[in-house]
Every structure is written in structure tokens, then in C-alpha cells.
Image (cartoon, rainbow, N blue to C red):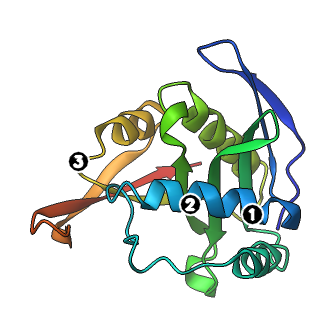
Amino acid sequence: MADFLIKQFVSKSGANVFIRSAREADASNILSLEKSVIDEEIFQLTSSVEFQMTVEDEEKWIRSHFENPNHLLLVATLNSEVIGMLDFSSGRRQRISHTGEFGMSVAKDFRGQRVGSFLLSSLLHWAESNKQLEKINLSVHSNNERAIALYKKMGFEIEGVRKKDLKYGDGNYIDTLIMGKFL
């Protein structure tokens, strides 16, 4: 995993938010964030019934990122609490090694405070200095309007739609938007 030095940002409410590389010591806080976001049962691929990660699983997942310099795992912290995270992985095969995909989560109480913008701008800054990467991709639920607006604002374009790709527990189908940005 690439090491991302700490950057400080100021949220809309005036709070100091720090973006940095995740560490194994963050496993418990990352797990709490993931669980809280997944428990909302919207905007995530994994349902709360399926989510069975343990702190040890999180530690192993964090360690797995250290094995590849083209992977990045960022956390956003406020007063030592993990309030957001971004996970980026480049393609493992030669023909897609110039691309990568990310996923991002922000705690509900901190949405609309620019935490997603801080995480994404940090990823883009890091990716632009990476000689191997040429393109960043993502998938987003079509009903996640706030995230789509952020991605468009940061230069991502919709490249495709997977119709009725997701089915929520209530029987409603949601499309998945495929977005990308060339560096």
C-alpha cells in the first residue's frame, strides 16, 4: 500500500478532519464505520445480514493493502474517530494495471461536511503522482444522488449503466452507474 502522509482539512462545520493511510490499529474503528453504513441498508453492495467481518478480518484486510504499492486505504478522522474511508485497488492483471477502482464510505452524521470530497481529492492527488495509473473507475448506486454529484464535480463521467443490477430487500431494483476519470 502506498503511504499517504497526513493531510488536514476543515469541514463545513469548522472541524479539523485528517486524511491519512489506514493502520492496523484502525481496524476496530473501520469495522464500526463499515457496520454503521451497511446497517443503513442503502448505497452498499453488502447487506447487514451478510456482513460478518471481525476485527481480526479487518486487520488482515488492512495488511493485504501493504503488499501492493498501487493500492491505497485512506481514513478520515475527527478527534481520533474514523468518520470516513476510501479503498483503492489497481488492476492486478497486466492489461488493466493502468486502472483502478475505489469504494468510499462516510459516517451518516458527517455527510454533507465535505469528508467525501477530502477523501476523493486525496486519492486523485496520490493517483496523479503514480506513474502506472491512468484511469480511476467506480460503481455507484443510481439512487445515491449526493455521491454522483460529488463524482461529477471531481471530473468523473458516466460510462455505462447496469440496469436493475441491485435488488434491495424490499424488492426494489436499482441501476448501477459505471463512472470513470482519466488522469
Left or right? Give the position of 175 relative to 157: left
Secondary structure at numbered mark 2: helix
Distance in Å between CA atoms under marks 1 and 3: 29 Å
Are the residues flagged by discs 1 and 3 in contact, CB closer than 8 Å?
Answer: no
Q: Tell me residue 18's x, y (percent).
A: 79, 34
Residue behind mark 1: 28
Report the residue at 79% width, 75% height from top: 59
Report the residue at 76% width, 48% height from top: 126
In front: mark 1 or mark 3?
Answer: 1
Q: Tell me residue 64's x, y (percent).
A: 77, 80
N-terminal of the pair, mark 3 or mark 2, is 2
Residue 136 visible at all: no
Secondary structure at numbered mark 1: helix
* Res 143 label: 3
**Type of amino acid under label 2:** Glu
Q: Does 146 appear above or below 127?
A: above
